Amino acid sequence: MPTDPHTPTLAETVHAACEAADPSGSDDRVTDFLTRFEDRDEPVSAVDDVEEELAEARGIIDPDFASEPLRNAVAVATYLAFRRDEIAADPADLIRRASAAEDMS
């Protein structure tokens, strides 16, 4: 029985974040964000400057920063990149915690 918890991939992390931020899949920008990272199978912990990479993707997808669901998805993905043990947490809690963490930075 393994003692180390599973380290999610970048794709799994972004997927969890998008599910939390846009569960109905109605925001095309969140869908674009998910698609951009869907093939990223490396552990999220192995991605150099994951915060910058996620923020850069947001800027490309939504240069006017008009999508609140995308803002939440990026915040949650960034939060989960560092708090991988919370990937299965309640979506509303994830958004709240990610937003609080974002405000602190």
Image (spheres, rainbow, N blue to C red):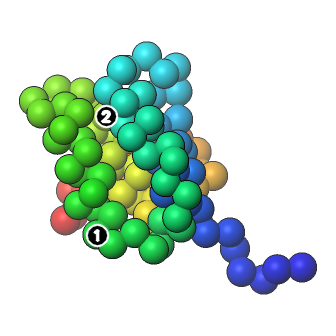
Disc 1 residue type? Answer: Asp
Q: Is residue 10 left or right of residue 58?
A: right
Q: Residue furthest top?
A: 26
Tell me the mark number nearer the camera, choosing from 2 and 1. 1
Gap in angstroms between the C-alphas marked 2 and 1: 19 Å
Percent x, y for residue 62? 19, 31
Q: Residue furthest bottom?
A: 3
Is residue 67 visible to us here?
Answer: yes
Classify the position of the N terminus by image quarter.
Answer: bottom right
Q: Is residue 77 left or right of residue 55?
A: right
Look at the picture and state if 23 lies above or below 87: above
Q: Residue at x 49, y 54 (%)?
A: 40
Is residue 99 visible to us here?
Answer: no
Q: Is residue 43 left or right of residue 46?
A: right
Percent x, y for residue 5? 69, 74
Disc 2 residue type? Answer: Leu
Q: Is residue 50 left or right of residue 46?
A: left
Residue that label 1 marks? 49
Which circle's residue, 2 or 1, is located before the other in the chain?
Answer: 1
Give the number of the disc on residue 70: 2
The kind of secondary structure element at disc 1 is loop
Residue 50: quarter of image: bottom left
The kind of secondary structure element at disc 2 is helix
Percent x, y for residue 70? 31, 34
Task: Pick the residue in front: 97 or 4.
Answer: 4
Percent x, y for residue 44? 48, 65
